[in-house]
Amino acid sequence: MIYNTPYCQLQHLKAQNAILCQWKQFCKGDDYREPLKFATQEIEKHQIATWITDTTNGFESEKGDTKWLLDEFVPSMISSSIEKVVFIITHDSPLMDEIKAQEVALSQFFDVELVESIE
């Protein structure tokens, strides 16, 4: 594990050259943004190719955090070594519509997959 707060846990999955971002509970502002900023540094340092987000305990982001994600985080990923984005999401997740929209938008820049488990 490389980062852990009450809201988010990041793991560097070295064998997969990936970062796994697991949201634990709703958060906003710095509690939401700081793990992603830290991940950006790790992506650059290790030339990580795959970003995995586990949405099992995910939540709909606040408008300000969504704007930050689109204005800051996504552009940093586009200019990074990331080639693939994976969302762990169950078929009946209340976040499915939001994740499907992200899949469409991110597919312009990355190989995007929706899977039901990390395995």
Image: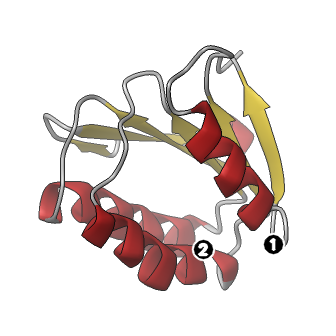
Q: Secondary structure at mark 2?
A: helix
Residue that label 2 marks: 77
Q: Where 47 sits versus 104, above or below?
A: below
> Closer to the camera, 16 or 20?
20
Residue 54: % across, % down: 51, 31
Residue 82: % across, % down: 70, 66
Residue 105: % across, % down: 73, 65
User: Identity of the amino acid at label 2?
Assistant: Met
At x 28%, y 40%, the residue is 8
The answer to the question of whether label 2 and label 1 lie on touching residues, with beta carbons closer than 8 A, is: yes
Q: Is residue 108 visible?
A: yes
- Closer to the chain start, of discs 2 and 1, is 2
Q: Is residue 14 visible?
A: no
Give the spatial CA distance, label 2 vs label 1: 9 Å
Residue 10: % across, % down: 38, 42
Label ID, residue 109: 1
